[in-house]
Image (cartoon, helix red, strand yellow):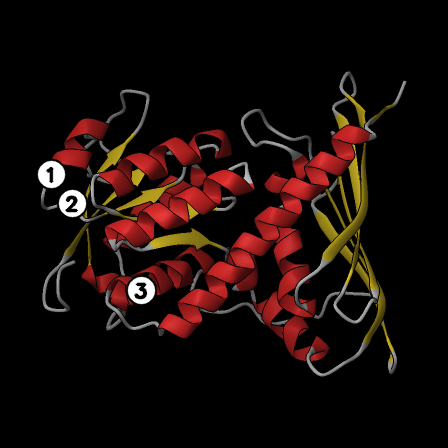
């Protein structure tokens, strides 16, 4: 890996909304931050595109072979994450990837082992933990004893390539694990009406203290993108998300700086291990939810 005096050549893979934001942030890094060490060398897309913000398109093979490219930021649809991660790690490149890292727990374990073998950083973006709203929520929850709780997310229909709903919605599961610690799945089911593009997943958990938690992920045309919470503590009930002022640094820029900190060796091994443990736990839970749901899938008529 380049030392702190050198630039870290970086490519963006996938040019959707997130990919364009990544390019923007790489071209305008936060002054005196780790993101200033990342130098954008090009972007990769399955489509043949014009320059993006004056940055040229390059081929995947070129990115994998060039010695001046040290890292890739993967912004493709979920179903192609695993293949792209594997190729860049095998080529000796660091990787930043949108959540979920892959669509199965087994493949995530393999990729983490590959990253360790290659001595490379494998960073899974979790901007949902960086929002001002969530940071305030975590402060409000810390130190309280949960009696029971529910997190109900609604949103538009799932897009092709996003995978099983427990994986596409891993951000909400990450909230619950980050707030309340490791969880045990007790039951899960999915109701689906494919013609109406409606799907509802309900997963039940227990915390280490045996407190029940419910996660509901509901998607259909016309449903607003909303998170509803109901957390009952021994001191009272929290039934709405806190209002927090918007921060001056964008979420993707915050994540880019975290990736940069890891590349520059500024994140402790204890922090890295704790983060990986959380990521693996969440993806293992998602896999278990999928197994339980597929065993008792209910198709609405």
Q: Residues within 10 Å of mark 1 (few under 14, many from 20)?
A: few
Q: Secondary structure at mark 2?
A: loop
Q: CA distance from mark 2 to mark 1?
A: 6 Å
Pick whichever, 116 or 152, lies toward us: 116
Q: Describe residue 244's horizontal placement relative to residue 192 as left or right.
A: left
Q: Nearer the viewer, residue 222 or 252?
A: 252
Q: Where on the picture, by quarter, is residue 49?
A: top left
Residue 242 versus residue 122: which sits nearer the camera?
A: 122
Give the Cα distance between marks 2 and 3: 17 Å
Q: Secondary structure under badge 1?
A: loop
Label at residue 69: 2
Is residue 222 at least partly visible in the picture? no
User: Nearest the camera: 23 or 112?
Assistant: 112
Q: Residue at x 42, y 35 (%)?
A: 82
Which residue is painted at 66% across and 63% down in the image?
182
Residue 126 placement (x, y as % from top left): 50, 55
> Which is more N-terminal, label 3 or label 2?
2
Q: Secondary structure at mark 3?
A: helix
Q: Based on the displayed image, in which of its 4 quarters is residue 132 positioned?
A: bottom right
Position of residue 224 measured from the top left corner of the image (x, y, whole percent): 73, 42
The reply to whether dot 1 and dot 3 touch (C-beta < 8 Å) is no
C-alpha span from label 1 to label 3: 22 Å
- The residue labelled by disc 3 is 262
Q: Residue 152 got which mark?
A: none
- Contact between marks 2 and 3 (CB within 8 A): the answer is no
Crowding around mark 3 (Cα neighbors within 10 Å: few <14, some 14 to 19, many 20+) is many
Query: Does residue 293 sit above or below 3 in this rendering?
Result: above
Q: Residue at x 32, y 50 (%)?
A: 115
Kindly indicate whether the residue at mark 1 contacts the one at mark 2 (C-beta within 8 angstroms).
yes
Left or right side of 8 for 154: right
Q: Which residue position is annotated with label 1?
A: 66
Looking at the picture, how far across and down is residue 80, in whole percent?
43, 30
């Amino acid at each position: 890996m380049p030392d702190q005096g050198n630039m870290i050549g970086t490519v963006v893979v996938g040019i959707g909304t997130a990919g364009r934001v990544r390019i923007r942030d790489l071209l305008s890094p936060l002054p005196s931050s780790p993101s200033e060490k990342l130098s954008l060398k090009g972007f990769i897309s399955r489509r043949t595109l014009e320059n993006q913000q004056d940055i040229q398109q390059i081929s995947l093979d070129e990115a994998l072979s060039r010695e001046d490219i040290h890292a890739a930021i993967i912004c493709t649809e979920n179903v192609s994450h695993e293949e792209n991660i594997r190729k860049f790690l095998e080529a000796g490149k660091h990787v930043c990837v949108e959540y979920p890292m892959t669509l199965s727990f087994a493949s995530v374990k393999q990729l983490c082992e590959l990253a360790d073998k290659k001595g490379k950083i494998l960073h899974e973006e979790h901007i949902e933990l960086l929002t001002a709203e969530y940071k305030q929520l975590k402060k409000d929850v810390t130190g309280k004893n949960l009696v029971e709780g529910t997190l109900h997310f609604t949103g538009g229909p799932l897009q092709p390539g996003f995978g099983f709903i427990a994986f596409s919605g891993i951000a909400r599961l990450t909230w619950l694990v980050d707030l309340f610690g490791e969880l045990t799945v007790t039951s899960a089911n999915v109701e689906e009406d494919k013609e109406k593009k409606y799907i509802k997943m309900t997963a039940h958990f227990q915390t280490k203290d045996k407190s029940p938690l419910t996660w509901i992920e509901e998607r259909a045309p016309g449903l607003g993108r909303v998170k509803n919470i109901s957390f009952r503590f021994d001191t009272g009930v929290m039934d709405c998300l806190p209002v927090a002022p918007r921060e001056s640094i964008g979420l993707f820029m915050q994540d880019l700086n975290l990736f940069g900190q890891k590349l520059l060796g500024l994140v402790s091994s204890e922090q890295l291990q704790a983060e990986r443990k959380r990521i693996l736990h969440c993806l293992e839970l998602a896999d278990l939810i999928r197994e339980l749901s597929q065993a008792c899938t209910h198709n609405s008529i």
